[in-house]
Image (cartoon, rainbow, N blue to C red):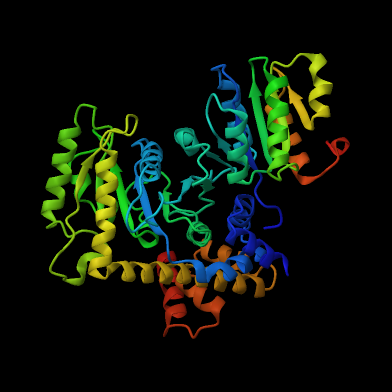
């Protein structure tokens, strides 16, 4: 019982209906020994924040393909902070233009994974973030 | 005030984040969680605990969603009474025996409940437990009970035939079937049907629903419809296990189901079984905890390597499991058991 099991919420906000990527990530994190709560398609930031609270997750991973990330992410960050969960690690995956990356990082997003990111890298980054290891100590 | 007292107080005041944290501490078996729960324990014993079990894919999550929605839509005498009851859901999904990870997907079917502060949904991984629940599920239910939820719906892992733990932890157990799930011999095997206080044929709009109901009815009639494990007390008015049909995706049949569930609650209270089942529940939880704790304490007291060594000896067939346990606990061996075991092995070799 040294390290509690990492709990991750994988959420699919917005209106696009493609959740294959989200499911692949959920499966990969499961295989990395994490407990992954998957909430299905078309979640509002409010629904995601509520699920993050009830499930007391360490990590929220958002899969966004619709281009609405600059609306959805700030709203979710605001809701998480308001409910006392500012410490939750936030990751974004999907189609994100390069010029938005600094803006997302400034909002507190730990990392953004585009198409082609390996599931091992993603699982390792999630674990590092939760276990508080510096990014540079990665093998 | 110590940390756990602050946490217990926050849970008592209805702070949802504090409750969520407490549930994590309990799930991870952290001392702080156990201490907070100890403070809250006098507040438990008030909630009505309903178990929902059945094979994977029968629609348990969708039905739990509909049950919660229906409970939240009305005032029920006996469940708070002046407002709709607060409903907590504990949904258990299996942990992978290989990676230790889990996908907890029951919330997908519960999106209708988002935004209702009278509902709290918590997903749990089974974490190696085999009876359809996690071994901390009962403590998680206690915490939700103390936090003031009047109804707690516990959805088990998709259960086959022997995952019957839920019956020890719930006042009322619903077993969910769907059309085409097996023939009449399946229905009279021991196990999951025996624990049903109510049987539900979900997906009743599919072909074969009537047949499923007929098979279940016949199975119940063979058993005289004795009604659950605790019905053996010989009370004159025995519970007749009803068979209900629902379509969880449309909500069809859910109101009658809620009425039947509450009818069972009334029956439990009138017959004295409410108290009896409450006692069973506490006894089962205490027993499980004692067993865990004794095993932990014993393991902690062993010199390094002794336990693996004993396992290896059993694997090499030098000792039977029973003899190994006797030796490890320092019990007197049963007369001649070691000698006869040696003799038996020698006999095999010859």
> Residue B301 occupies which quadrant of the picture?
bottom right
The number of discs equals 0
Percent position of residue B93, x then y:
48, 44
- Reply above or below: B322 against A106: below
Residue drawn at point x = 68 percent, y = 36 percent: A79
- Reply above or below: A112 against B312: above
- Residue B289 in view here: no
- Reply above or below: B30 against B250: below
Percent position of residue B46, x then y:
42, 64
- Screen quadrant of the C terminus of chain B: bottom left
Give the side of residue B253 with respect to residue A83, left or right.
left
Residue drawn at point x = 41 percent, y = 85 percent: B335
Question: Which sits in the foreground, A123 or B143?
Answer: B143
- Residue B171 in view here: yes
- Screen quadrant of the N terminus of chain B: bottom right
> Residue A81 occupies which quadrant of the picture?
top right
Question: Which sits in the foreground, B316 or B208?
Answer: B208
Give the side of residue A33 with respect to residue B85, left or right.
right
Give the side of residue B62 with respect to residue B319, left or right.
left
Question: Which sits in the foreground, A85 or B217?
Answer: A85
- Reply above or below: B200 against B226: above
Percent position of residue B324, x then y:
51, 72
Residue drawn at point x = 19 percent, y = 53 percent: B241
- Residue reaching furthest right? A136
- Residue reaching furthest front? B82
Percent position of residue B302, x then y:
65, 73
């Amino acid at each position: 019982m040294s390290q509690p099991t990492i709990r991750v919420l994988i959420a699919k906000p917005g209106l696009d209906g493609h959740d294959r990527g989200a499911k692949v990530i959920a499966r990969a994190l499961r295989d990395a020994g994490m407990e992954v709560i998957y909430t299905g398609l078309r979640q509002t930031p409010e629904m995601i924040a509520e699920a993050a609270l009830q499930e007391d997750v360490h990590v929220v991973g958002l899969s966004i393909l619709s281009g609405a990330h600059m609306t959805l992410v700030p709203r979710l960050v605001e809701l998480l902070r308001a409910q006392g969960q500012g410490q939750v690690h936030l990751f974004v995956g999907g189609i994100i233009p390069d010029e938005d990356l600094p803006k997302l990082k400034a909002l507190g997003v730990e990392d953004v994974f585009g198409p082609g990111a390996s599931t091992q890298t993603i699982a390792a980054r999630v674990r590092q973030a939760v276990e508080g290891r510096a990014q540079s100590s990665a093998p | 005030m110590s940390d756990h007292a602050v946490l217990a107080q926050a849970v008592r005041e209805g702070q949802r984040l504090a409750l969520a944290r407490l549930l994590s501490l309990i799930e991870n078996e952290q001392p702080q969680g156990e201490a907070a729960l100890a403070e809250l324990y006098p507040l438990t014993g008030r909630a009505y605990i309903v178990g929902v079990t059945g094979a994977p894919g029968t629609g348990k999550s969708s039905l739990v969603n509909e049950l919660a929605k229906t409970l939240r839509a009305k005032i029920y005498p006996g469940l708070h009474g002046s407002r709709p009851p607060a409903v907590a859901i504990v949904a258990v999904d299996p942990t992978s025996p290989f990676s230790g990870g889990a996908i907890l997907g029951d919330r997908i079917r519960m999106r209708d409940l988002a935004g209702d502060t009278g509902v709290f949904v918590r997903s749990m991984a089974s974490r190696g437990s085999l009876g359809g629940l996690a071994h901390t599920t009962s403590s998680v239910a206690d915490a939700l009970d103390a936090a003031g939820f009047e109804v707690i719906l516990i959805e088990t892992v998709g259960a086959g035939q022997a995952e019957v733990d839920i019956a020890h932890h719930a006042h009322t157990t619903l077993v969910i079937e769907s059309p085409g799930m097996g023939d009449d011999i399946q229905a009279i095997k021991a196990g999951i049907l025996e624990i049903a206080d109510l049987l539900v044929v979900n997906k009743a709009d599919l072909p074969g629903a009537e047949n499923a109901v007929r098979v279940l009815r016949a199975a119940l009639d063979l058993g005289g419809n004795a009604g659950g494990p605790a019905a053996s007390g010989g009370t004159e008015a025995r519970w007749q296990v009803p068979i209900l049909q629902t379509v969880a995706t449309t909500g069809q049949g859910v109101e009658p189901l809620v009425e039947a569930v509450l009818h069972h609650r009334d029956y439990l209270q009138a017959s004295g079984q409410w108290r009896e089942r409450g006692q069973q529940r506490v006894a089962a939880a205490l027993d499980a905890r004692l067993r865990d704790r004794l095993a932990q304490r014993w393991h902690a007291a062993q010199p390094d390597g002794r336990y693996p060594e004993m396992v290896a000896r059993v694997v090499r067939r030098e000792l039977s499991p029973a003899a190994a346990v006797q030796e490890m606990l320092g019990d007197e061996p049963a007369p001649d058991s070691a000698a006869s075991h040696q003799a038996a092995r020698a006999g095999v070799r010859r």
